[in-house]
Image (spheres, rainbow, N blue to C red):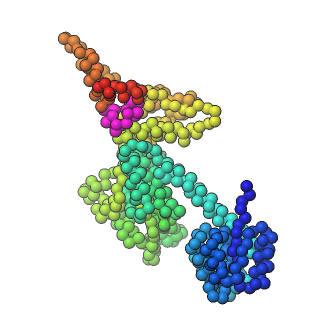
């Protein structure tokens, strides 16, 4: 189906000029409606969503500025083009600042107007496309990218949803590899700030003097080696989100400066006396115990409270083992996208059981590494087996060590076995927060078998 022709509203009080332009635009294939005055244009705008409005700036009565303002207000996506006399080009620029797409100065050649209209329409198309790309980014970085259905993860999603649209500072705490950066990105992507930048800086990866320059920027000659002026990350993140990773390692002098930014939303570049104002949302992350560092005097208490407005504690993977099969499936999918006609790669029951056992302290990142390694070792096999796992996951500790030797008087074997079952099933259910499917996988049972056993016991 061909794209519908753009509709243009042409506003000009000079009849002769307007009808000539109108005719030529119609020749080019546009649908066109003419208005002789601002009043007439406003009335037409009320009834119809034009794609483009071309309006003379100077009109008797309601002038072009008001018409354009009203059009933009009512239809934010409209392409507004101002026609102006040379004397009033400055006014046209003003209107562009308020949202108009472009202008042409009288007298103009028709081709010039045509060019302005078509390139403005192209611009708008690109903008729509960006919106589409952004939506895809949402899937890659937003909540949609996060895997996990366990209770702690569901609580986390709710919290993210709730605080993302606000400007509240967020402090994300969690062991290494639990997904802190992923959550920070999800907060950014779920906020209106997503149209601006997400700027990340790892405080532990950069030595102290450089870290200050990275954050605040500097002017030329501010210190040895400062050959040019440079914008800091704070300025880059203006209207967006600044992610301060490993905030616990930030040196004391910088903690103080950061505090001021959080309190006053302003700072100076190094070597500069001018104050820069920024609108940033700060999200910080740490795998250190910040409250303890505060008690020990290693982290500023006032800064901690400024950062910790919203606290998010990411659960370690061992507290949500029921999410492991979902994560594994996601990693296989992203690392080895499904090819047409080939069977999907599966994980053997035995291997999955090892992954879900807690003899191993890894988190999401480590799990991802394990899967990556297994896929590489599997060399095109369509399944991941125990022998594809790293050694620390491969050996199953013998359950026999805990069993006492057969007593002189013998044992009540059915009772003993029953107790063992009850004990292990209880543990599996506790660890999976009652998720029977996940518990069954941990025990190497079918779900139905487990359900039966639970009933019997
Ligand atoms: N819930 C999740 N769903 C899917 N992938 C996840 C999830 N959490 C983390 N990941 C993935 O695990 C890896 C580690 O996550 P991330 O870098 O966010 O963790 P981190 O807590 O910042 O780790 P570190 O302390 O090592 O910096 C990333 O590749 C990320 O995509
Ligand atoms: Mg990280």
Closer to the camera in the image, 11 or 429:
11
In the rendered structure, does residue 440 fall within the stretch colored magenta?
yes
Closer to the camera in the image, 227 or 261:
261
Closer to the camera in the image, 62 or 121:
62
Task: Looking at this view, name the residue that lies furthest to the left.
Answer: 409
- Dominant SS of magenta comes to helix
Q: Please tell me whether residue 439 is drawn above or below residue 157 in the rendered image.
A: above
**Relative horizontal placement of residue 105, taking residue 145 as reference (left or right):** right
Location of residue 67 (image quadrant): bottom right
| Residue 258 drawn at (x, y percent) | 38, 65
Residue 202 shows in this picture: no
**Relative horizontal placement of residue 272, taking residue 452 as reference (left or right):** right
**Relative horizontal placement of residue 195, taking residue 399 as reference (left or right):** right
The residue that appears at 41% across and 29% down in the rendered structure is 447
Quarter of the image that includes the N terminus? bottom right
Q: Please tell me whether residue 347 is drawn above or below residue 189 in the rendered image.
A: above
In the rendered structure, does residue 42 fall within the stretch colored magenta?
no
| Residue 381 drawn at (x, y percent) | 56, 28
The residue that appears at 46% across and 39% down in the rendered structure is 326
Q: Please tell me whether residue 68 is drawn above or below residue 344 in the rendered image.
A: below
**Relative horizontal placement of residue 103, taking residue 94 as reference (left or right):** right
| Residue 234 drawn at (x, y percent) | 46, 65
Read off the magenta span: 427-441
The residue that appears at 38% across and 67% down in the rendered structure is 262
| Residue 154 drawn at (x, y percent) | 40, 47
Quarter of the image that includes the C terminus? top left
Residue 33 shows in this picture: yes
The residue that appears at 52% across and 37% down in the rendered structure is 332
């Amino acid at each position: 189906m061909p794209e519908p022709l753009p509709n243009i509203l042409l506003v000009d009080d000079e009849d002769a000029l307007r009808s000539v332009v109108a005719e030529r635009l119609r020749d080019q294939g546009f649908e066109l409606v003419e208005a002789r005055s601002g009043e007439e244009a406003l009335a037409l705008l009320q009834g119809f969503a034009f794609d483009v409005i071309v309006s003379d700036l100077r009109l008797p009565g309601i002038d072009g500025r008001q018409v354009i303002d009203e059009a933009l207000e009512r239809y934010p996506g409209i392409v507004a083009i101002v026609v102006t006399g040379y004397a009033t080009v400055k006014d046209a620029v003003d209107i562009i600042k308020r949202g108009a797409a472009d202008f042409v100065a009288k007298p103009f050649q028709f081709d010039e107007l045509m060019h302005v209209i078509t390139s403005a329409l192209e611009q708008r198309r690109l903008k729509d496309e960006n919106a589409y790309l952004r939506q895809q980014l949402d899937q890659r970085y937003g909540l949609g990218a996060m895997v996990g259905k366990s209770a702690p993860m569901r609580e986390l999603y709710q919290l993210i949803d709730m605080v993302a649209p606000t400007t509240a500072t967020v402090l994300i705490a969690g062991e290494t590899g639990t997904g802190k950066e992923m959550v920070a990105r999800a907060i950014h992507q779920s906020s209106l700030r997503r149209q601006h930048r997400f700027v990340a800086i790892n405080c532990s990866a950069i030595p102290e003097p450089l870290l200050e320059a990275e954050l605040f920027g500097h002017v030329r000659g501010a210190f040895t080696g400062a050959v040019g002026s440079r914008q800091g990350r704070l300025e880059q993140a203006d209207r967006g989100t600044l992610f301060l990773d490993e905030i616990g390692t930030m040196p004391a002098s910088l903690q103080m400066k950061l505090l001021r930014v959080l309190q006053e939303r302003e700072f100076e570049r190094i070597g500069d006396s001018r104050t820069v104002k920024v609108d940033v949302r700060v999200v910080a992350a740490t795998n250190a115990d910040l409250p303890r560092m505060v008690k020990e005097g290693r982290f500023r208490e006032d800064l901690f409270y400024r950062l910790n407005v919203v606290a998010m504690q990411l659960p370690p993977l061992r507290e949500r083992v029921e999410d492991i099969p979902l994560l594994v499936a996601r990693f296989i999918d992203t690392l080895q996208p499904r090819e047409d006609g080939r069977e999907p790669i599966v994980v053997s029951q035995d291997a999955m059981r090892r992954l879900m056992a807690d003899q191993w302290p890894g988190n999401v990142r480590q799990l991802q590494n394990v899967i990556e390694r297994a896929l590489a070792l599997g060399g095109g096999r369509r399944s991941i087996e125990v022998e594809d796992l790293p050694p620390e996951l491969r050996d199953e500790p013998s359950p026999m060590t805990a069993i006492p030797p057969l007593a002189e008087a013998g044992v009540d074997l059915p009772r003993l076995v029953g107790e063992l079952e009850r004990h292990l099933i209880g543990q599996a259910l506790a660890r999976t927060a009652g998720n029977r499917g996940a518990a069954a996988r941990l025990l190497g049972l079918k779900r139905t078998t487990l359900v039966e056993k639970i009933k019997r016991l």
